[in-house]
């Protein structure tokens, strides 16, 4: 038995006690503990980690820590290509797709509004969320730290903010999504891809004032929800612009 030393960087410190945030944490090891075990024992889900260095050398989660070794743990580098360095992941996930837990329904709607493929149901079980994340290579967004510690989950993020509008800003900033957004391309209700539809084919479903004042429509082929630039459109445009501009300002 002896000690190893582990230090977490950037937002990974959010998971630590205040006393552990700015110093290497000393942990007891017997020589058979894996990096994954130690990282999660200290409260950091492995899905938040993108680079592990042991004495300056990149290792994977199954590396067994030896007495006296120094481990550096870094968060996900979504806007930086570290494929030639990191042994943690087989390949990067640069076309982000999401699966969202049952407590983040409004966040799911906002992600779809921005055009991101986002799975959400208000009755998803934890095992379903973990399986979807793994099988479909989706980033699992959740407020449940324990869910992110499931071994099958390789991409995930613990949402810190409470307010949905702050949450979408957090996610856009965290995953560098501004340049990838395609607003109004997906159905905010079911995630289907919208397509333009002629007014003539759907006018029987329109209210009289809508039929009189609006002429361009999109429809979801899956749930048949209709979309048009109604009275709320300017407010929505300002909201989207504020999200994307804030993220761009942060990136400069």
Image: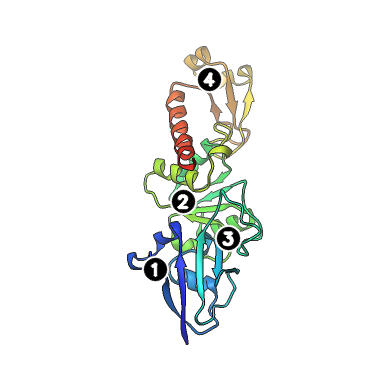
Which tag is nearer the camera, tag 4 or tag 2? 2
Q: Quadrant of residue 34?
A: bottom right
Q: Badge 2 is on which residue?
A: 102
Q: CA distance from mark 3 to mark 1?
A: 27 Å
Q: Is residue 94 above or below residue 82?
A: above
Q: Please name which of the two marks, 2 or 1, marks the residue nearer to the observer.
A: 1
Sequence-earlier tag: 1 or 4: 1
Residue for badge 1: 23
Comparing marks 3 and 1, which lies closer to the viewer?
Answer: 1
Tell which circle, 3 or 4, labels the residue nearer the N-terminal end: 3
37 on left or right of 57: left
Residue on which disc 3 sits: 154
**Residue 44 visible, this orientation:** yes
Q: Position of residue 203 (x, y in %)?
A: 58, 18
Residue at 48% over, 44% down: 173
Q: Residue at the location (44% across, 46% down)?
A: 170
Q: Earlier in the sequence, mark 3 or mark 1?
A: 1
What numbered label is drawn on residue 3?
Answer: none
**What x and y, as percent, mark residue 47?**
53, 60
Query: Which residue is drawn at the image coordinates 47% and 34% (left, top)?
Result: 245
Q: Is residue 18 above or below residue 29?
A: above
Q: Secondary structure at mark 4?
A: loop
The residue tagged with tag 3: helix, strand or loop?
Answer: loop
Task: Compute the Cα span from label 4 to label 2.
Answer: 32 Å
Which mark identifies residue 206? 4
Q: Which numbered mark, 3 or 2, is in the foreground of this view? A: 3
Q: Do we see residue 189 in this rendering?
A: no
Q: Residue at x 59, y 52 (%)?
A: 138
Nearer mark to the viewer, of 1 and 4: 1
């Amino acid at each position: 038995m002896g000690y190893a030393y582990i230090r977490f960087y950037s937002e990974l410190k959010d998971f630590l006690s205040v006393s552990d945030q700015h110093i290497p944490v000393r942990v007891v090891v017997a020589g058979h503990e894996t990096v994954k075990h130690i990282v999660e024992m200290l409260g950091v889900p492995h899905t938040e980690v993108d680079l592990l260095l042991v004495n300056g050398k990149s290792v994977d989660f199954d590396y067994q820590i030896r007495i006296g070794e120094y481990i550096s743990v870094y968060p996900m580098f979504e806007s930086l290509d570290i494929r030639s360095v990191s042994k943690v992941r087989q390949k990067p996930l640069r076309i982000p797709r999401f699966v969202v837990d049952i407590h983040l329904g409004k966040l799911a709607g906002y992600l779809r509004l921005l055009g991101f493929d986002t799975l959400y149901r208000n009755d998803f079980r934890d095992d379903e969320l973990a399986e979807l994340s793994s099988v479909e290579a989706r980033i699992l967004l959740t407020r449940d730290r324990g869910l992110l510690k499931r071994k099958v989950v390789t991409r995930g993020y613990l949402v810190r903010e409470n307010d949905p509008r702050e949450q979408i800003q957090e996610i856009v900033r965290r995953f560098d999504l501004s340049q990838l957004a395609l607003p109004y391309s997906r159905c905010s209700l079911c995630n289907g891809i919208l397509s333009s539809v002629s007014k003539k084919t759907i006018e029987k479903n329109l209210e009289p004032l809508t039929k009189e004042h609006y002429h361009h429509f999109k429809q979801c082929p899956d749930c048949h929800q209709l979309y048009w630039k109604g009275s709320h459109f300017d407010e929505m445009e300002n909201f989207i612009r504020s999200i994307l501009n804030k993220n761009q300002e942060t990136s400069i």
